[in-house]
Amino acid sequence: MNRINILDKDTFNKIAAGEVVERPASVIKELIENSIDANSKNIHIYIEDGGKRSMRVVDDGDGIHKDDIEKAFMPHSTSKINSIEDIEKIKSMGFRGEALASIASVAKVNLKSKIESEDMGREIEIWGGSRRFIKDVGIPQGTQIYVFDIFFSMPARLKFLKSHISEFSYIIDVVTRIALGNLNISFNLYKDGKKVLFTNGKGSLREAVLSIYGKNFSENLIDVLYHKDLGIISGVVGEESISRGNRNNQTLFVNSRYIKNRMLSVAVENAFKSFIMVNKFPFFILNIELFPDLVDINVHPQKMEVKFLKEREVFSLVFEGVHLALKEYFKKEKFEIHTENDNYTPYEEAYQEKIDISEVEIPYDLRSKNPAYDKEKNKNVDFLENKVEKFTFSDKLASKDTIKFEFKREAKFPKLQLIGQFNKSYIISQHEDLLYIIDQHAAHEKINFEKYVKDITERKVVSQILMIPEVIELTQSEVLFVYENKIVFETCGFLFEDFGENTIVLKEVPLFIGNISARSIFMDVLENLQAMGSGKEIEVRYNKIASIACKSSVKAMEDLSEEEMISLMDDLRFLDEPFTCPHGRPTIIVHSVKDIERWFKRI
Ligand code: ADP
Ligand code: MG
């Protein structure tokens, strides 16, 4: 063993810098975050040779006081916190006070800065930790920092860097993420003199997506906004068409700080799985606002990782928020109108606005004898017939005629051609070059589930009277619980009456469950509801009831006729979420001819 040495300051900084300064992109991250912390409105970033030659960040923020400019480069120097207690309530990006010191210890740095109240600013230059000069300088308010010859005294680190292009792609990634998280700041990124990225700082996420990712992305976004006790999730997720084979286009912020978190990416991806059959990764930009004491951001110097105090709840917040947004979105059919003129008729307008027409009455005043009106009317009727499943003209005499209609539901996958049944359990079918394997049990369950939930919410569950009512003895707490939730049970089609002495008599159950299993389903529902506690929203309870009732209502291993299989597949196509069963397992698996050729080692 060697004797113990105390490292000199310079060596210590170089080691510490390794953590902060991994590559040019990490320098850019620290510098931009400093500019943001200094309340800048406009940040310009100039990169040469992927940052290996130089990086310049110019901001119009508060600036650094003349007399602090040297201090800013000392380790553990920060204007952002005084003591450990401050960390708890920290809002700013940086706070460790080590970035500038670290950067200056592994590169050559020139910094100029001026605060508002002074006429002159000050300039300092430090190479590898040693000061070259310090002097007054005339510059506008703000800070300009120039970092060049990164790792000039550390050939091993320099060698570890990738090509200019690769290093620049890391930088673009950092700038993109930070720009998306700071919509009120305008960012300009230049690569070897050419502007490659710009955001206007006007606060619109969609505008930022448009300028960073382009039109195709900005036009295929779905808004997310969802609250729970724990926090708020907001932002956008992308339609399937802008999903990609990797997770590069997934951006997550916690309290506006960019983070990476596998668990939350999975939460978003799982939410997608109910609606579309994706083997790609969805695009998203989401911000989660949580109480600061539920998050620990101080787990890694790069501050990209966070720990959550209530992981499971954060997962649900994200899953439910995205799931709800997608559900709303997929409920509404997308369409394009090709009319000769651009005057939308009321129906089209309503359709455009995605109003739920089945709920709305639209004035219908086109019954005039005027031929022009007739033409207009025909156009409307054509339109309606193409787009609408059911429409009724209601004649209320005089001018207040209304029309009601419901839009056709959109199929979530194409009509399949049946091949047959396998092992009394799976339906095999095809469309073009795809092979579909449907789990008949899961599919059936999901069809029942969606219908049942719909019936519950519309208060039209059909129940059946049990030929022989079931007398059920309950515990004291169960008795209390069933009476507290009597309305919930009734809405779901379970009717019971008091039978005295902790006993009830179950008289009616939902029609679709059949009467053999009535008692056990009722008990299952009861136990599960009780286990959920009373804090849950009513929809969550309905969903639980539905998932239990449907689970026991279908039998596995059943011979199905051709007609039964075709109708099952047809029902499945029009569900809101056909691709997973109520318990989250897949209902359909698809393989392409390519997959099969691969199995047979043809390709
Ligand atoms: P930290 O950001 O963790 O405080 P840094 O080493 O990144 O530590 O910066 C040290 C200090 O230098 C900051 O606390 C801040 O006072 C000052 N500073 C750095 N960059 C800027 C900037 N662009 N504008 C104003 N002040 C800055
Ligand atoms: Mg900093």
Image (cartoon, rainbow, N blue to C red):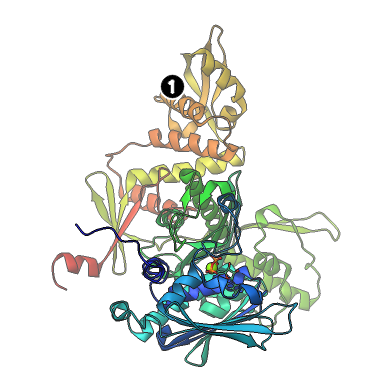
The percent coordinates of residue 389 (x first, y second) are 58, 58
Q: How many marks?
A: 1
Task: Give the quarter of the image for residue 32.
Answer: bottom right
Quarter of the picture for ligand 2? bottom right
Vertical side of 405 occupied by 242: above or below: below
Q: Is residue 385 above or below residue 163?
A: above
**At label 1, which amino acid type do we have?**
Arg
Quarter holding the N terminus is bottom left
Foreground residue, 588 or 378?
588
Q: Position of residue 407 (x, y in %)?
A: 60, 59
Q: Residue at x 47, y 42 (%)?
A: 449
**Residue, disc 1:** 519
| Front in this rendered view, residue 223 or 519 | 223
Q: Nearer the viewer, residue 261 or 369?
A: 261
Give the farthest residue toward the left. 601
Residue 461 image point, x, y percent: 56, 35
